[in-house]
Image (spheres, grey):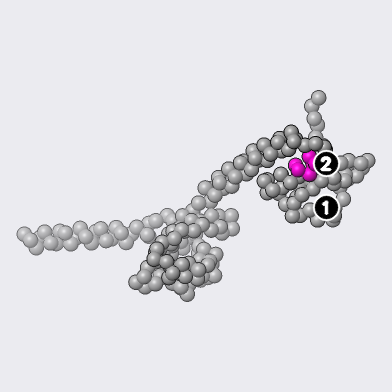
Amino acid sequence: MNRNLKTSVSGKNQEELMQLADFPENNPNPIVETDSSGEIHYLNPAAKKIFPDLKKLKNKHPYLSNLDSTFDYFRKNPKKECLREMQIGDDWFQQRIYYVPKNQHIRIYGRYITQHMRYLAQTTKITQLYSVVSKVNEAIIRARDEQSLFNEICKIVSEIGDFPLVWVGKIDGFDVWPVAYYGPSSNYLKEIKVIKKDLPVVKIPP
């Protein structure tokens, strides 16, 4: 009776171990195990599909970038887990990285977060837009003259809206001359000439 019970428990344990072993294989997200030299010790099917050249490129692959600093972090800190986000082309991935002291490997559990990052980027742009509109309205109220208003608007839109160049021009015959500008790419205005026919036509209702 005891022998049968022992066999039953042993069989159950083996079944649980098999399920645990199948977990990374069936995980739709990439799982990678590597050492400090960049040698790949494990890739689950998802990692092989998403990064077919990972095993060949090793730590030269962007998915395994800055491995040296990651290993240094684990050597200097008692914490054996860290989280980082990275962009590869147009895609974003979150990596939850665990250090395995036994063999000095790291295991990287990846997650595709491109949609999330795009949403954050859109939200940031909308927030910037509202902030720009608010600050420009304040500048209009405070402005004492036209020139100071143009200067302040260019500065606000460039700094808060994150534009490399913002400028205001006045039409003089067929030419358009910058009267105010701001941003790290302001020198670009010295390299171009804008004429009236280049400007988009905007019809303002009466």
Residue 157 higher or lower than 110, as above or below:
above
**Quadrant in the picture for the N terminus:** bottom left
- Residue under the image location 53 percent in, 55 percent down: 92
Q: Is residue 6 left or right of residue 54?
A: left
Q: Secondary structure at mark 1?
A: helix
Residue 16 is drawn in which quadrant? bottom left
Numbered mark located on residue 146 in the image: none
Look at 52% across and 67% down and name the residue there.
66
Which numbered circle lies on residue 189? 1
Of residues 199 and 120, the one nearer the viewer is: 120
Residue 97 location in percent, x, y?
Answer: 43, 62
The answer, for residue 45, to whether it is visible in the render is no
Q: Classify 10 Å Cα crowding around label 2: few (below 14), some (14-19), many (20 and above).
A: few
Q: Which numbered circle lies on residue 147?
A: 2
Q: Amino acid at mark 2?
A: Gln
Q: Is residue 175 above or below residue 96?
A: above
Number of numbered discs? 2
Estimate the x, y position of residue 49 in percent, counting from the top left. Answer: 48, 60
**Kind of residue at disc 1:** Leu
Is there CB contact under 8 Å for labels 2 and 1? no
Closest to the observer: 127 or 77?
77
User: Residue 69: x and y, percent?
Assistant: 50, 68
Q: Is label 2 in a helix, a strand or a loop?
A: helix
Please give the range of residues in magenta. 147-153
Q: Is residue 128 visible?
A: yes
Does residue 187 belong to the magenta stretch? no
Query: Mark 1 Cα within 10 Å, few/some/many (few <14, many 20+)?
Result: some
Q: Main secondary structure of the magenta part?
A: helix
| Residue 206 at x, y percent in the picture | 81, 24
**N-terminal of the two: label 2 or label 1?**
2
**Residue lying furthest right in this view?**
173
